[in-house]
Image (cartoon, grey):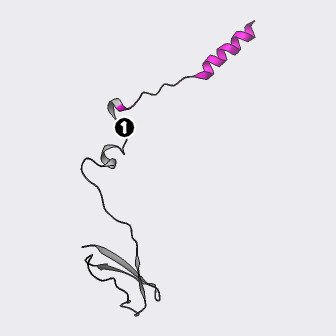
Amino acid sequence: MPVYEYQCKDCGKIEEVFQKISDPVRTICPHCEGKLSKLISQSSFHLKGSGWYVTDYGGAKTGSETKPETKTDTTSSESKKVSAKDSD
């Protein structure tokens, strides 16, 4: 059963309510009888198993999919050119 959050516009209290999707939306605050508004809260929904972006494509690449990094050291070749000009 989903958990819904409501906040009272008068007293500011936030209330969590277990409700069916088919239940009517609450409109009256049980504390002060003010007007309630439904809040949008963060979900804890997780996709598990294979076939989802997170499990198949979202992580770091492994195995043959990764390309080895090639590092070129330009400072050593530049210093050789400079030292060759200085010796002339």
**Residue in front for this viewpoint, 59 or 57:** 57
- Above or below, 34 against 17 in this view is below
Question: Residue at horizontal 62%, vertical 17%?
Answer: 77
Query: What is the span of residues highlighted in magenta in the rendered image?
Result: 65-88
Write down the quadrant of residue 1 in the picture.
bottom left
Q: x%, y% of residue 28?
A: 38, 90
**Which element type, helix, strand or loop, lies under badge 1?**
loop
| The furthest residue to the bottom | 33
Measuring from the top left, give residue 37's x and y in whole percent. 42, 82
Amino acid type of the residue that numbered disc 1 sits on in the rendered structure: Lys
Q: In this view, does 6 lie to the left or right of 9?
A: left
Q: In this view, does 76 lie above or below 36?
A: above
Residue 52 in the image: state x and y as whole percent.
30, 49
Residue for badge 1: 61
Q: Quadrant of the C terminus?
A: top right
Of residues 2 and 79, the one drawn nearer to the viewer in this rendering: 2
Image coords of residue 69 (percent x, y): 46, 28
Residue 83, magenta (yes or no) = yes
Q: Main secondary structure of the magenta part?
A: helix
Q: In the rendered image, which quarter is residue 30 located in? A: bottom left
Which residue occupies 38% across, 91% down? 31
Q: Which residue is at a point 32% across and 63% down the rendered structure image?
A: 44
